[in-house]
Image (cartoon, rainbow, N blue to C red):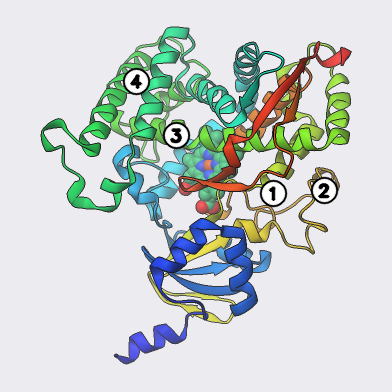
């Protein structure tokens, strides 16, 4: 062993060894695994993974240190590049350094707080349309219901598509493109061949090409519109980069796919948890219904999106049930973290699960208590559900606004109840976490709107 590699070893915090076993145990039970490792090795520990060495960081203070680092310290995290085949090389999720900073500057104005108001009516309408199909007595799987709503919302917001037929074409195209991302060819490169049109890679490529064709039609049509619409595609067609150049069709395509994919499943899972938690806490449900009723019998969706009680319930849901369990940063040239000199190439993983269970920040962290978010503002290293720093989730305001509008639209109209006697477990959904069984709830009764519950 040369002295440089011995030095690098010495600079890593202690931790368990045997990569496949650790990855498996962590995937199986992320909360239990973290607790065991922290008890054994301390709050910061290293862990081998199939994709290289990880350093897991579990406290808000250490998370602040990571989030204060920028593009000069860090490359993109890991794992995300597996999605490059679908998202494209201009995707914000895959860019690092100057390219990331440039593209983020292009996309950020599209997500400014005030622009979110334009999307609230579409969020309300999508919720009303789906809710109209719920019948008293039936059991609905909230993950599926919310996914249908959030898919409609994101297609309308990103592409401006509203005609029912075109919406359904896009719904199918996105579902196929996502469900056909089979993990095998992504991890095993020789499987990335179309083999005369047979096999998972050929299927994935067929769906991707069909999806790309649809997007190309929308981009062409947006370029020829006399007046830009409120949708994100209209903004992208209109905007220029730092050199004053318009974005190419392929850059726009990659941004659209990234937003369509990143922007719906996460929000749907968060909403499924939110409805579940409200059914478990009748006093919180009553409080929400009273707050919503103060907005009148037909609340304006924009007011719903801003209602503090709904925003607090949305944030507390994401605190107790983070959808994305970690944020990742790859060390570029070495990074000083607490007392460690972390070598280049190591991936720092901020455990959102652990940070949001911190007892000092969140007394009785196991309790669902939205009031915490009315009494205090939390910084991104404390409430880390959307990550932070230079990679803070671009759609955070959009997601919180959608959660509030959908909850505020459906809660006053439908009484729901969990079908399970015991608390729902957290399970893995691809790389994210979600409620066991998709959170099945029974529709107990239809209510008559905000003012008359
Ligand atoms: C509850 C819903 C959501 C959750 C929990 C969530 C969570 C996250 C997290 C943890 C990150 C990584 C941040 C980091 O590394 O510091 C991220 C990044 C990102 N999210 Fe979200 N997200 C949600 C909704 C959305 C929506 C609705 C959109 C778009 C409409 C979106 C677009 C993005 C994009 C583009 C990035 C990459 C940002 C960058 O690398 O600069 N997300 N999100």
Q: Which residue is mark 1?
A: 319
Neighbours of disc 1 within 10 Å: few (<14), some (14-19), many (20+): many
Q: Distance from label 2 to label 1 (Cα)?
A: 11 Å
Return the residue at label 3.
Answer: 261
Quadrant where the image shows the N terminus: bottom left
Inspect this view and state whether residue 72 appears: no
Name the residue: 63% across, 56% down: 353
Does label 2 or label 4 sit earlier along the sequence?
Answer: 4
Q: Earlier in the sequence, mark 2 or mark 1?
A: 1
Q: Measure the alpha-carbon separation of dots 2 and 4.
A: 44 Å
Could you say which quadrant of the image residue 301 lies in?
top right
Asked if residue 308 can be seen in this view, the reply is yes
On residue 219, the disc is 4
Could you tell me which quadrant the C terminus lies in? Answer: top right
Closer to viewer: mark 3 or mark 4: 3
Mark 2 near mark 1, Cβ–Cβ under 8 Å? yes
> Which of the two residues, 416 or 342, is positioned nearer the viewer here?
416
As drawn, 368 above or below 165: below
Res. 372 mark: 2
């Amino acid at each position: 062993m040369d002295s440089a590699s011995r030095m690098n070893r010495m600079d890593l915090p202690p931790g368990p060894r045997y990569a496949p076993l650790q990855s498996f145990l962590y995937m199986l039970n992320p909360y239990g695994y973290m607790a065991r490792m922290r008890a054994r090795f301390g709050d910061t520990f290293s862990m081998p993974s199939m994709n290289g060495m990880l350093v897991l960081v579990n406290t808000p203070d250490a998370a602040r240190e990571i989030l204060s680092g920028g593009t000069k310290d860090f490359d993109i995290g890991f794992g995300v590049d597996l999605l490059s085949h679908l998202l494209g090389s201009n995707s914000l999720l895959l860019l690092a350094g100057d390219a990331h900073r440039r593209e983020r500057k292009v996309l950020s104005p599209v997500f400014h707080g005030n622009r979110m108001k334009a999307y609230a009516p579409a969020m309300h309408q999508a919720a009303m349309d789906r809710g109209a199909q719920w019948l008293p007595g039936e059991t609905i799987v909230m993950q599926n219901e919310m996914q249908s709503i959030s898919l409609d919302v994101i297609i309308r917001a990103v592409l401006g598509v509203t005609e029912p037929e075109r919406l359904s074409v896009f719904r199918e195209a996105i579902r196929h493109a996502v469900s056909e991302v089979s993990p095998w060819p992504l991890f095993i490169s020789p499987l990335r061949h179309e083999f005369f049109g047979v096999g998972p890679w050929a299927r994935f490529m067929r769906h991707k090409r069909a999806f790309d064709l649809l997007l190309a039609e929308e981009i062409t049509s947006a370029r020829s519109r006399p007046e830009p619409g409120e949708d994100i595609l209209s903004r992208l067609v209109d905007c220029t980069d730092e050199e004053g150049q318009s974005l190419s069709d392929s850059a726009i395509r990659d941004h659209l796919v990234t937003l369509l994919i990143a922007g719906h499943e996460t929000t749907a899972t968060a909403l499924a948890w939110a409805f579940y938690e409200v059914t478990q806490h009748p006093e919180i449900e009553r409080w929400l219904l009273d707050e919503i009723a103060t907005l009148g019998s037909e609340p304006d969706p924009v007011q719903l999106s801003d209602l503090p009680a709904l925003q607090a319930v949305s944030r507390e849901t994401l605190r107790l049930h983070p959808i994305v369990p970690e944020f990742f940063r790859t060390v570029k040239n070495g990074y000083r973290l607490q007392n460690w000199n972390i070598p280049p190439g190591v991936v720092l993983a901020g455990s959102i699960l652990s940070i949001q269970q911190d007892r000092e920040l969140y007394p009785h962290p196991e309790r669902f208590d939205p009031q915490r978010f009315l009494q205090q503002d939390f910084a991104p290293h404390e409430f880390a559900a959307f990550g932070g720093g230079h990679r803070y989730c671009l759609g955070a305001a959009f997601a919180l606004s959608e959660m509030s509008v959908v909850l505020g639209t459906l809660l006053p109209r439908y009484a729901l109840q969990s079908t399970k006697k015991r608390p729902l477990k957290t399970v893995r959904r691809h790389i994210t976490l979600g409620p066991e069984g998709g959170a099945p709830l029974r529709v107990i009764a239809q209510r008559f709107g905000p003012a008359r519950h």
